[in-house]
Image: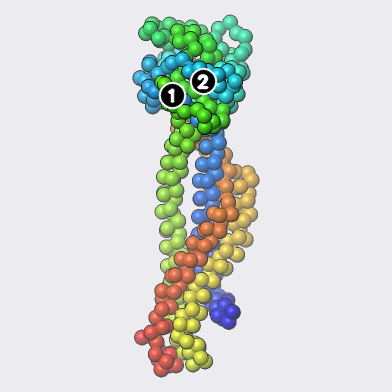
Amino acid sequence: MLAFKLAYRNLIGAGLRTWLNVIVLSFSYVVIIWHKGFLDGWEQQAKTDMIMWETGAGQFWHERYDPYDPFTLTDAHDSLSPELAKYASEGKLAPILVSQGTLYPDGRMLPVLIKGIDPRQQVLSIPSRKLDTAVSVVPALVGSEMARSARLKEGDIVTLRWRDVNGTFDATDIQIVGIFQTTVPSVDIGQIWLPLDRLQAMLLMKGEATYLVLASSDGTLSSSGNWVFHSRDELLKSVDDIIKTKSIGGSVLWIILMLLAMLAIFDTQVLSIFRRRKEIGTYIALGMTRWQVVGLFTVEGAMHAFLAVIVGALYGVPLLTIQAVKGLSLPVSSGDFGISMASRIVPVYSAGLVAGTILIVVLVTTIVSFLPARKIANMSPTDALKGKIQ
């Protein structure tokens, strides 16, 4: 307890030098917590949106289906097995049929993916109910990014061409009955959504699908026949990889901030020991062992981190709270990145994140404070009384 009291008095007595170090350390606290909270918020938002709009609780893919290879779509379709058909009829599965096509808006030619979905499905957040609209042509849904790039608006009638299962080209007019907003570009950009039964009839693939989306995880279902099961974690792996990459990049910023703060602490400790040689000798003359004096200087250095917590809380808590409530507005959309990203991301600051950051900074600060203080342990009692350091 005596060491803490002495350390506190010495720090306060150092004046501006102490507060400069504390401010630098507090800035490190706030920036590290903010950056990690931003990534955690982005990850939670991206995964939630992808589950709601695309992946569901998992998917069954046709064994030949590859979402990154459009040439696989020609053969990637089949009828549902009796078990899967039963789940689909109960609303626990949403069959989706995918095919390539060409859209002709305003005389332009635009390659698209045509996706068929049951208007009554409730597995995904896609507003497929709008496909029940009675129109003279085939009803269609598009996302906002697709509507912007193709210059489409609700009510437009455009020509769509496709190739059926026999390789025969055909075309018809479709009417845009709805435009939906989503942060998941993989259900928006370059895609047209049609009623499943209409698309099956157009492609001559009655009762067939390309992949199936599960409403909830069910351990009784597994890969069978031509259908290969992909779990939610597997489908969300791309998001995990992106966040991991961003975290590694952010670590460079953290390291730079920590190095600056630790360099300031190290230099302060070295200068303090040099200037306070007679004081060190006095401590030893009064009965303190050399290692007790080392401990005193180490505590002084470590207390910079504790004071930085208080200072950082004074401006960091209001700033981070405002962002956690209102979110952080981004000048880009998900279409610009090609990944799920909302125009406003709400950071997530967990208790573990805050406590972990404080613990790491305090631990590193203590180690850096101890390194120059070790020199005191090599002092002889005579040199200490004379105020000399070897």
**Residue type marked 2:** Glu
Residue 201 appears in the figure:
yes
- Position of the N terminus, as image quadrant, is bottom right
Q: In which quadrant of the rendered view does residue 4 lie?
A: bottom right
Q: What residue does disc 1 label? A: 224
253 and 114: which is toward the camera: 114
Residue 177 appears in the figure:
no
**Residue type marked 1:** Ser
Position of residue 299 relative to residue 159, above or below, is: below
Q: How many marks?
A: 2
Q: Residue at x 49, y 79 (%)?
A: 295
> Disc 1 and disc 2: Cα gap in Å?
10 Å
68 and 235: which is toward the camera: 235
Point out residue 80 in the picture as x, y percentages from the top left corner. 48, 17
Disc on the earlier residue, 1 or 2: 2
Asked if the residue at tag 2 contacts the one at tag 1, i.e. Cβ–Cβ closer than 8 Å, the answer is yes
Q: What residue does disc 2 label? A: 83
Q: Residue at x 46, y 43 (%)?
A: 243
Point out residue 178 in the picture as x, y percentages from the top left corner. 59, 19
Q: In which quadrant of the rendered view does residue 290 lie?
A: bottom left
> Most extreme residue toward the front, as rendered?
220
Point out residue 303 in the picture as x, y percentages from the top left corner. 54, 71
Q: Is residue 183 left or right of residue 379?
A: right
Position of residue 235 relative to residue 289, above or below, is: above
Tag 1, which secondary structure?
loop
Position of residue 309 relative to residue 5, above or below, is: above
User: Residue 169: which disc?
Assistant: none
Instruction: Estimate how packed mark 1 is, as few (under 14), some (14 to 19) or many (20 or more) residues with alpha carbons within 10 Å.
Output: few
- Position of the C terminus, as image quadrant, is bottom left
Tag 2, which secondary structure?
helix
70 and 30: which is toward the camera: 70
Instruction: Estimate how packed mark 2 is, as few (under 14), some (14 to 19) or many (20 or more) residues with alpha carbons within 10 Å.
Output: few
